[in-house]
Image (tube, rainbow, N blue to C red):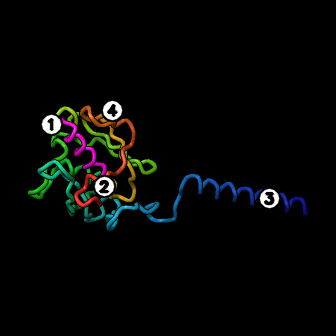
Amino acid sequence: RAMTRRKKAMTVGLALAVLLTAVALTGCSLLPFGRPSGKTGEDPVTPGPGQGEMVLRLYFGDKQAMFLLPEDRTVTAPAGKTYEQLVVEELITGPKLADQVRTIPPEAKLLSLEIVEGVAYVNFSIEIQTKHWGGSTGELFTIYSIVNSLTESPNVTAVQFLIEGKRVESLVGHVDATKPIERNADMISGGK
């Protein structure tokens, strides 16, 4: 009997050790949104899909093509839409402030958006390429408008661009889009 108890105790101890190791290796957290985002300012309010109003922090270009300017926009979350989906849809809608300019062609459509381990896989229709106005600066503003807006969410640390479900080398020929792209605070007016 003493051997059986010891074996049971060892088995339980081993199982507990394996479980704790698995939790540590997968980066699980007891925080409600995972680990802290490390961004300045308050994290956005992110109720579940279809749960009332959300304040989105969006970034659009300035008229001199020097910086991204923030716009806080309050929207009602329809059923089935996440904070991140609303961010991209509102970026496509365009800016509401007079000193800002559009960064995404209005013909572009968000086909899907999935977040896996902090990376937002954002799948656009082909119009994000075919209707884009081009140029390296224009492409930079499109990419970082999307990336910086999405990384305001505590759920997102980087963005992987997809077009019609496939990875592309770049959106319009200037910026490497083959890997997830992280936030670039240097492009934001005031650097936040």
Quadrant occupied by the N terminus: bottom right
Measured from the top left, where is residue 88 in percent x and y?
26, 49
Q: Do the residues labelled 3 and 4 touch (CB within 8 Å)?
A: no
Query: Residue tagged by mark 4?
Result: 168
The amino acid at mark 3 is Met
Q: Name the residue under label 3.
A: 10
State the residue in front, 74 or 97.
Answer: 97
Residue ID at (80%, 58%) = 10
Residue 130 horizontal side relative to residue 1, left or right? left
Image point 27% across, 44% down: which residue?
143
Q: Identify the residue position indicated by label 1 in the image.
A: 133
Mark 2 vs mark 4, CA separation in Å: 24 Å
Left/right placement of residue 16 relative to residue 166 reads right
In the foreground, 86 or 102: 102
**Residue 135, image x and y in percent?**
19, 36
Identity, as a three-letter code, of the amino acid under mark 2 = Ala
Q: Which of marks 1 and 3 is nearer the N terminus?
A: 3
Query: What residue sits right under mark 2 in the picture?
Result: 185
The picture quadrant where one finds residue 133 is top left
Magenta span: chief secondary structure? helix
Q: In which quadrant of the rendered view does residue 43 lie?
A: bottom left
Residue 63 visible in the picture: yes
Q: Between marks 2 and 1, how big is the CA–CA gap?
A: 24 Å
**Magenta-colored span:** 133-148
